[in-house]
Image (tube, rainbow, N blue to C red):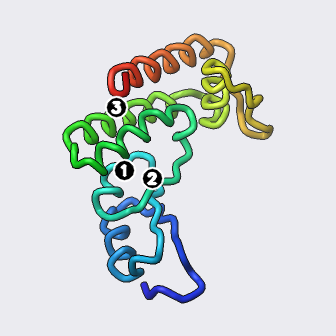
Amino acid sequence: MMAKDQVIGVKNSSMPVMDINMWKLRAGKDNIVFNGPDEQFVGGRVMGADAGIGGTYGVYPELLMEADRCVREGNLDKALKIQLRINDLISELTSFKGNLYDVMKLILKQRGVNVGRARLPLPHVEENEMNRVEEVRKHIDESIEEFVG
């Protein structure tokens, strides 16, 4: 892993956070390393990631911003609690028969941002699971209220 002059940043999506640390150690201060896996945002930040890029961030950006603030301010206890809640939410988001992107788009609509549905051939959330979408959205709102206020 050698830094090249034409590369100024990288998104590391491997699960070992050690990879982030290795990129940061070799890349130098002028390079940016992003954490990829949503399930390890806090771990990636602690190991040196400058920020994160994740697929589920859009449905609860407040939680990621608060976790990031906690990491920057050294409140790792709270940051870890937020990460554990995010991981619970990710488990809920991925438990549907429909595609994760359709679930997230439905939740975004409930949160006031209508971005339509997932494009075919991605499967849509089944009608009998729509009440669960609302439950997950409530869990997100409760989590935001608990951690962000």
Please count the marks in the image: 3
The front one of 131 and 113 is 113
Q: Residue at x 51, y 30 (%)?
A: 93
Q: Secondary structure at mark 3?
A: helix
C-alpha span from label 2 to label 3: 15 Å
| Residue lying farthest to the right in this orientation | 120
| Quadrant (top left/top right/bottom left/bottom right) for the N terminus | bottom left
Position of residue 95 in the picture relative to residue 68 (left or right)? right
The front one of 125 and 21 is 21
What residue type is disc 2 on?
Answer: Pro
What residue type is disc 3 on?
Answer: Arg
The front one of 96 and 45 is 45
What residue type is disc 1 on?
Answer: Gln
Specify few, some or many for label 3: CA neighbours under 10 Å numbering under 14, 14-19, or 20 or more. Answer: some
Name the residue beneath numbered marker 2: 37
Relative height, residue 123 to residue 69 (above, below): above
Sooner in the amino-acid sequence: mark 2 or mark 3: 2
Q: Secondary structure at mark 1?
A: helix
Q: Residue at x 58, y 11 (%)?
A: 131
Specify few, some or many for label 1: CA neighbours under 10 Å numbering under 14, 14-19, or 20 or more. Answer: many
Q: Position of residue 54 (x, y in %)?
A: 52, 49
Q: Position of residue 20 (x, y in %)?
A: 37, 68
C-alpha span from label 3 to label 1: 12 Å
Sooner in the amino-acid sequence: mark 3 or mark 1: 1
C-alpha span from label 2 to label 1: 6 Å
Q: Are marks 2 and 1 in contact (CB under 8 Å)?
A: yes
Name the residue beneath numbered marker 3: 85
State which quadrant residue 85 falls in: top left
Q: Residue at x 29, y 62 (%)?
A: 47
Name the residue beneath numbered marker 1: 40
